[in-house]
Image (tube, rainbow, N blue to C red):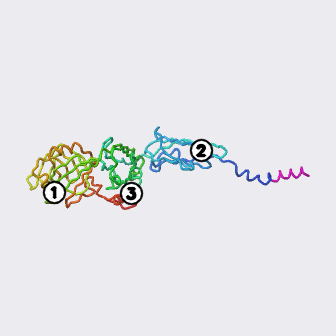
């Protein structure tokens, strides 16, 4: 009787579990790749994605014309995606391995080609220049050769890396120009690396970025100049310490054109000499001038410079210029020599305000207003 009871105990569980055992049979992992293998006109702006069912991804490697494609896994290791979009008109090779239940392994390889754009993207111009040392107010300016349709996608593809953590934002000033600035001036003496991951970004219908661009530049010493047009004085400070005091003469303000703009300017470029012409006037007309001016540092697009002029009788006493800030030749030469692009020049005391679009008047906008011009803010375009 004991023997039979044991036999029944053994037989009953086996009979009752037969169908369950069959349903839990291990299934091999299934890997899918997007774009599809052998595709010849893959959209580059959708990137590369590798997924697995019934397992986890243990290895994914991808190459674009023998260059590695950078990507990352999701936390469950069931999805791998490329960090950036793909290069147009390029062959991609993908290898992936996945492991499932019971140690089952699936390996797959695929090849595809991205589409060839129907229109060229045009040149992309970036400031600062590679390896340039700039002032603490320097913006990053990107000018595109074609009007941008998907500003959100483009803005997400613009990466700024700094030695010192910074809060910054992009702002669109036109369909072809976007500008980056920090919330406050850059911390001095640090490296900034800007990368525009534009390869594969859809810029306009039929137009895709064809290559990434990287510009590395350095923030130099902190030099800020203040110009008081009422006292006719300019003071230059380096890291807060006064390094130069200059008697100046500013715009005579008989017209708007001859009024120096008040606000936070940035030094933009310089020349020695610079030819200065009266705007909108022909030779012989009242107010016409055509002069070569030495040690000229431009601070706006409305013809304003800090420059040399030998009118010592006015400097420190009266404003008599056409809108520029002029100083004694030796002191103007010192400023010319020491100025970096992006050095702030803060002017006060006039009734004309510098517009944000006038040259690099970007610091005229409060931070909250600046951020509204970002495509990622969801606000209407500024322009």
The residue at 42%/47% (across/down) is 200
Residue that mark 1 sits on:
258
Are dots 3 and 2 in contact, CB under 8 Å? no
Which label was assigned to residue 98?
2
**Cα–Cα gap, marks 3 and 1:** 36 Å
Residue 189 on image: x %, y %? 33, 44
Q: Nearer the viewer, residue 163 or 58?
A: 163
- The crowding category of the residue bearing disc 1, from other C-alpha atoms within 10 Å (few below 14, some 14 to 19, many at least 20), is some
In the image as oriented, which residue stretches furthest toward the right?
1
**Cα–Cα gap, marks 3 and 2:** 39 Å
Which label was assigned to residue 375?
3
Residue 259 on image: x %, y %? 17, 58
Are dots 1 and 2 in contact, CB under 8 Å? no
Q: Can the viewer see residue 244?
A: yes
Give the main secondary structure, helix, strand or loop, of the magenta stretch: helix
| Residue at disc 1, secondary structure | loop
Region of the chain picked out in magenta, as a range: 1-12
- The crowding category of the residue bearing disc 3, from other C-alpha atoms within 10 Å (few below 14, some 14 to 19, many at least 20), is many
Q: Can the viewer see residue 143?
A: no
- The crowding category of the residue bearing disc 2, from other C-alpha atoms within 10 Å (few below 14, some 14 to 19, many at least 20), is many
Whichever of callouts 1 and 2 sits on the residue coming sooner in the sequence is 2
**Could you say which quadrant of the image residue 221 lies in?**
top left
């Amino acid at each position: 009787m004991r023997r039979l009871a044991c036999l029944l105990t053994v037989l009953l569980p086996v009979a009752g579990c037969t169908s369950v055992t069959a349903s839990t049979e291990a299934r091999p992992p299934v890997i899918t790749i997007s774009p599809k293998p052998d595709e010849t006109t893959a959209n580059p702006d959708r990137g590369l994605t590798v997924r697995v069912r019934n397992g986890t991804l243990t290895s994914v490697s991808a190459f674009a014309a023998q260059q590695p494609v950078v990507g990352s896994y999701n936390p469950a290791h069931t999805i791998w995606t490329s960090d950036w979009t793909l290069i147009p008109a390029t062959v991609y090779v993908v290898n992936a391995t996945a492991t499932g239940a019971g140690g089952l392994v699936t390996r797959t390889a695929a090849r595809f080609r991205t589409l060839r754009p129907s229109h060229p993207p045009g040149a992309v111009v970036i400031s600062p220049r590679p390896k340039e040392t700039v002032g603490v107010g320097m913006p990053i300016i990107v000018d595109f050769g074609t009007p941008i349709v998907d500003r959100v996608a483009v803005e997400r593809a613009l990466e700024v890396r700094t030695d010192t953590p910074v809060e910054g934002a992009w702002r669109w000033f036109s369909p072809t120009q976007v500008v980056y600035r920090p919330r406050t001036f850059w911390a001095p003496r640090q490296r900034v690396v800007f990368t525009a991951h534009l390869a594969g970004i859809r810029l306009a219908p039929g137009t895709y970025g064809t290559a990434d661009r990287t510009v590395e530049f350095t923030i130099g010493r902190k030099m800020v100049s203040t110009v008081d047009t009422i006292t006719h004085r300019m003071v230059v400070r380096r890291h807060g310490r006064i390094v130069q005091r200059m008697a100046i003469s500013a715009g005579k303000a008989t017209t708007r054109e001859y009024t120096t703009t008040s606000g936070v300017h940035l030094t933009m470029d310089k020349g020695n000499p610079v030819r200065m012409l009266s705007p909108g006037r022909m030779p012989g007309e009242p107010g016409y001038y055509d002069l070569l001016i030495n040690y000229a540092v431009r601070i706006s697009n409305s013809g304003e410079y800090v420059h040399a002029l030998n009118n010592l009788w006015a400097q420190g006493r009266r404003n008599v210029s056409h809108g520029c800030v002029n100083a004694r030749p030796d002191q103007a030469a010192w400023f010319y020599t020491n100025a970096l692009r992006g050095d702030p020049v803060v002017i006060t005391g006039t009734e004309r305000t510098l517009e944000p679009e006038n040259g690099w008047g970007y610091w005229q906008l409060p931070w909250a207003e600046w951020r509204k011009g970002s495509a990622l803010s969801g606000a209407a375009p500024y322009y």
